Image (spheres, grey):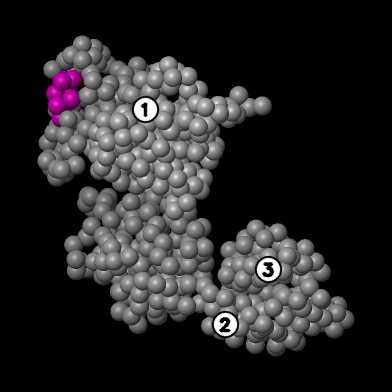
Amino acid sequence: MSPTALPAAGPEHGHVTFLGAGPGDPGLLTLRAVEALSNADVLVAEHEVLDVIRTHARQGVSVVQTDADPSSVSPPGTGTPQLTVVDGTSTPAAVPGGARDAAHLVMEAARGGRRVVRAVSGDPGLDTYAAEEMLACAAAGVPFEVVPGVAAAVGVPAYAGVPLRDADGADVRFVDARTASDRCWSEVGASDSTVVVSTTLDSVAGGAAELVSAGRKPDTPLSVTIAGTTTRQRTWTATLGTIAQTLKQAKVLPSPDGGRPVIAVVGERSAADRRDQLSWFESKPLFGWKVLVPRTKEQAASLSEQLRSYGAVPHEVPTIAVEPPRTPQQMERAVKGLVTGRYEWIAFTSVNAVKAVREKFEEYGLDARAFAGIKVAAVGEQTAKALVAFGVKPDLVPSGEQSAAGLLEDWPPYDPVFDPIDRVFLPRADIATETLVAGLIDLGWEVDDVTAYRTVRASPPPAETREAIKGGGFDAVLFTSSSTVRNLVGIAGKPHNVTVIACIGPATAKTAEEHGLRVDVMAPEPSVHKLAEALADFGMKRRAAALEAGDPVTRPSERRPGARRRRSTT
């Protein structure tokens, strides 16, 4: 058994896992943390930490929020406890009205044999209050374990491109400005070690002055990072003597956000020229871009993941809803014919077609074995992936263009000698074009063209999203078909003129232009992944041009309204 295997919860006291949620990027959660979250009955955490961990919690988990206000930045355990739920089936944890600190919340939540995850930002070993909560559990006989996390003081500099040590070696000191004594400042000020300071934005200049007065040279390099490891991350480089002026010139201070936590790194290892080479995160091609993905939710998942890898923040807005056909009899007859040997081929032209057939199979108690002896074609790689997930490996995927035309290029003509059956089952949308049907008939095949699903315009998105679309709140919009253009404009309005418009192909671009949109990016081939790549390339060129001109790197949504836009040659 693994030494980190989940221990059994006691029938009376339950079990508590003190879990480090890392500095903000959900991808930094450890495998052990994800395992503990998936088995938790109750989550206890501050609002910002809940945003990181909640996606890994099981359905029905109860959530105890320890800060009274989502915008609160008070230390853990000082706010009035609030109860929230992950989903509609959640059951709130029982918390007595007098239990106001996190230690009592944790122990109360654990009673009755429940597994509790007490999640903290960063690492529990560096959390100011976690040790006290562990001692309280020990005194009450509540068993607990600790799952370490990535500490902000280590993870944030790594994401900012600021190495804490190099081949020459250096002492590294960690200082919490909120609790640091005069002696602490004196010691780090008199040394030449790298100092990592956890502080707030409006306290950075004061901390720099403390170090200078303690002996550090005013020209010692300094970097300051806010919202580290998230797509809101921002880093400034200066020296101990110039940081106050740098933040003022950048119009960062004074600001209502002055109380937000930051990580400052002091020392020669944080020199600006090194960061220019090592800043891998903030230099991603679409870093911080808010990108609208107007597709059905099932289709948007893989595209959104790709956009995240470029540093973007995808926002999925369904523009098309998929519904069953109005008359299911035709689909039912075709599926029965599939089982009884009526077809030589079945051709899938979309992920939705795979889903429709799979659902009909499940309705009849069938599975992928029903495809035995039948050749299977997929119009492209995403459709092929959906088939593989169903347990079916397609026999034919276009070697060239991933479209109906590309599929026809590779489709074999009917041969009465080698093909015992001349019929093809084609499950598809109600508004599909006739290209594939006509092409298959020309190749000598009989086609059962069956409506497997209907596509209808989705409901309008929330008012906040509609305002962001029309007001320039999005940096880019990806259009993957002409219908997504028409439907998005129909349900949400026309994107603002500062928003970058990216289209999957000429037909989609033409529709966008007909709706008064200027197309900035077009995919080199009709693939959603090539479209995302083209947008990333656009963002990279845009960033390089700003740096070459000596201008600050900004997002399209930060440009002034009416600014002239250049068309991409991508």
Query: On residue 341, which mark appears?
Result: none
The residue under label 2 is 326
- Give the labeled residue for mark 1: 104
Percent x, y for residue 518?
Answer: 31, 74
The part of the image, by quadrant, that contains residue 377 is bottom right
Magenta-tinted stretch: 205-212
- Amino acid under label 1? His
Whole-angstrom CA distance, mark 2 to mark 3, is: 17 Å
The amino acid on which the numbered mark 3 sits, given as a three-letter code, is Glu
Q: Earlier in the sequence, mark 3 or mark 1?
A: 1
Question: Which of labels 3 and 1 is toward the front?
Answer: 1
Residue 321 image offset from top left, x and y in percent: 48, 72
First in residue order: circle 2 vs circle 3: 2
Q: Position of residue 126 (x, y in %)?
A: 36, 23
Q: Is residue 173 shown to the viewer in this render?
A: yes
CA–CA distance between discs 3 and 1?
Answer: 49 Å
- The residue at the point 48 percent across, 19 percent down is 141
Residue depicted at x 23% and y 57%: 558
Question: For numbered disc 1, what is the local secondary structure?
Answer: helix
What element does badge 3 sit on?
Answer: helix
